[in-house]
Amino acid sequence: DAKTTQPTSMDCAEGRAANLPCNHSTISGNEYVYWYRQIHSQGPQYIIHGLKNNETNEMASLIITEDRKSSTLILPHATLRDTAVYYCIVSPYNQGGKLIFGQGTELSVKP
Amino acid sequence: DTAVSQTPKYLVTQMGNDKSIKCEQNLGHDTMYWYKQDSKKFLKIMFSYNNKELIINETVPNRFSPKSPDKAHLNLHINSLELGDSAVYFCASSQTIAGTDTQYFGPGTRLTVL
């Protein structure tokens, strides 16, 4: 079973920041937080991951709370092409790459 | 160049048949995976291979048999297909089995069992 809780759906206006929350209150010390997204009819795509520090790359920023029980994925300037299901995944470093996907958040970016 | 490719993209077949799905990655990765996404859109890992060795087998029925002839290929053979096998099957690869290595997914194979 997935160890994360995410809202089922969210809307965002094009050009605005999209903030996608994720709750992972039972996260263990050796578990990372990963974000993937799945655009309709495509395979999942990696976005970002982190352990306890905030992370930023060309796609997004990941903010992890100090107690690590929740995190937020930020898409700074959402575009229509960011419409997708976003998955927050918690998994240890040494579990052979096993990712357990939950239901994810369906993000709709609207013009 | 497609990083992770799968064939076929669509597969329609009758119950009881045997079918195979092929996956190839040109990224030079050591680890490959099979995931299943059912009609409710839940994505579940089935198998992973590292350097042609089975690492993860997630209580999948033994009608499903993965085969890795080399590091760049991971095929999935399914015997005696059942209605419940209808799903989208995704192949993925990563540099190593380390959880922090990005997994690159293929475009999926939509299997429909009639």
Image (cartoon, grey):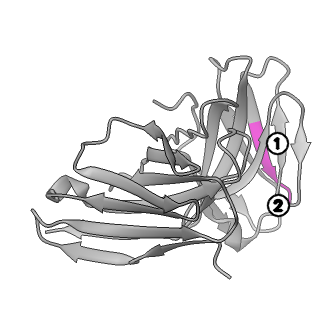
Q: Is residue A107 visible?
A: no
Q: What is the quadrant of the C terminus of chain A in the image?
A: bottom right
Query: What separation in Å lies between label 1 and label 2 (alpha carbons)?
Result: 17 Å
The disc numbered 2 marks a residue on which chain? A
Q: A70 or B53, which is in the foreground?
A: B53
Can you identify the residue that label 1 sits on? A62
Of B32 and B81, nearer the camera is: B32
Q: Amino acid at mark 1?
A: Leu
Element assignment for label 1: strand
Q: Are marks 1 and 2 on the same chain?
A: yes
For residue A40, side relative to residue A21 (left or right): left
For the record, the magenta segment spans A72-77
Residue A33 at x, y percent in the picture: 71, 35
Secondary structure beneath dot 2 equals loop
Quadrant in which the N terminus of chain A appears: top left
Answer with mark 1 or mark 2, whichever residue precedes in sequence.
2
The answer to if B85 sits in the magenta stretch is no
Image quarter of residue A96: top right
**Residue shown at 68% from the left, 82% from the top:** B1
Density class for disc 1 (Cα within 10 Å; few <14, some 14-19, many ≥20) is many
The secondary structure making up most of the magenta span is strand
In this rendered view, identify the residue nearer to me: A27 or B12: B12
Residue A86 visible, this orientation: yes
Q: Which residue is mark 2?
A: A16
Choose between A39 and B36: the one closer to the eye: B36
Using the rendered view, name the quadrant where residue B19 is placed. bottom left
Amino acid type, callout 2: Arg
Picture disc at residue A73? none
Note whether B73 is above or below A88 in the view shown. below
Residue B101 locus on image (x, y percent): 73, 46
Q: Position of residue B107 (x, y in %)?
A: 52, 71
